[in-house]
Image (cartoon, rainbow, N blue to C red):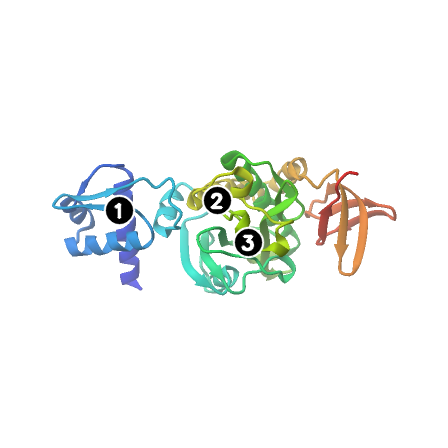
Amino acid sequence: MAKTNDEATSRAMIFEMLMENPGEIIPSSLLTQKLSSSRQAVFKAVCALRDEGVPVESVPQRGYRLDGIEGLQRLSPTMIEYFLRGNPLFNRCIYMKETDSTQKVIKKLALQEAEAGVLALTERQSEGRGRRGRSWQSLDEKNLMFSMLLRPALKPGEVQLLNLAAGLAVKKTLRELCGIPAELKWPNDILCRGRKLCGILSEASGEPDRIYYAVTGIGINVNMESADIPDDISAVATSVCIESGRQFARWKLLVEFLDRFAGFMCLLTSRGGAAKLLALYRTSCDTIGKDIRVMQDEEVFNGRATDITPEGALVVQTGEGEKIFAAADVHHLRMA
């Protein structure tokens, strides 16, 4: 394990030097001096960076240079951790080409007493799911699928607030970075022009009065094109690429989201922060004020969404009076 940590440190140090000198050739001798290691060890670390998709160029007899990374589609954990250095919450990234579920990966780490701020990323997951156990479609190097380990000072009944914070962060990121009219649908979906492009799932473990840990998983359809979406969901699913007409570097979208999410989490866990977060959510949630259809268990209710409770539940005015839903399927009804 120590060897693995040493190798990760070497990759991080080399990447940092290359990033801080964009386009410049960094002599091999300088890298060996910085790492206090051999040229062979430097070469091994460079090869590992290349395996992560980082475009490090070898310049014979001189050293190494980093080409542009703006359009890079691979998800490099070393690069992502570099850009998370100023993030107050997230600091560690685990990347797996394939896994059963990033939620399971993070839960296992949580039980091993891992600190908050760990992020698990994958391209494919055999057991990926959303709320109510629904499966989540995934394609290699097209989407973002990740789970985050959180240890917030919240009670089990407040777990919904994590979904609200994540939803605010996703919507803000997609609007500001991607320029698409993302909509926030209670409790945990992001839509664009009525079609879904992101789902959020938060789970927690704890006692009645406190949470030991929480795992928030997010799936974002980023660079899927129309042909990539199965026919049976093409009317209800979309992607950032479809809505914007261009592809985005997934690593940048991820880092930008994590910056915003950390900010909302800091707000949520501050004194009086839950009320402030809810106030932001009420003004940003596109479900509020809409005529909706709510499906809970086998019952269906039509009404108008009017508010969000302090615990994050949805208040709906129906023909039978006011009802509160802590969890349910919600569909926005189109105006006639």
Say left or right for 266 vs 98. Answer: right
Compute the Cα span from label 3 to label 2.
12 Å
Secondary element at image label 3: strand
Q: Mark 2 points at which residue?
A: 258
Q: Where is residue 8 in the image (x, y as percent from the top left)?
A: 30, 55
Query: In the drawing, does residue 181 fall left or right of residue 56?
Result: right
Q: What residue type is labelled 3?
A: Thr
Question: Which corner quadrant holds the N terminus?
Answer: bottom left
N-term mark: 3 or 1: 1
Q: Are marks 1 and 2 in contact (CB under 8 Å)?
A: no
- Relative image position of residue 183 (x, y in whole percent): 63, 40
Counting from the top left corner in percent of width and height, residue 103 is at 52, 60
Depth check, mark 3 against mark 1: the one in front is 1
Residue 221 is tagged as none
The amino acid marked with disc number 1 is: Val
Give the residue type at disc 2.
Answer: Leu
Local packing at callout 3 (Cα closer than 10 Å; few below 14, some 14-19, many 20+) is many
Give the class, few, some or many, for how many residues have Cα within 10 Å of label 2's Cα (few <14, many ≥20).
Answer: many
The C terminus lies in quadrant = top right
**Alpha carbon separation for disc pair 3 and 1:** 33 Å
> Which residue sits at x=56%, y=40%?
243
Q: In which quarter of the image is residue 292?
A: top right
Viewer-nearest residue: 214 or 51 = 51
Tag 1, which secondary structure?
strand
| Label annotation for residue 56 | 1
Residue at the spot of label 3: 216
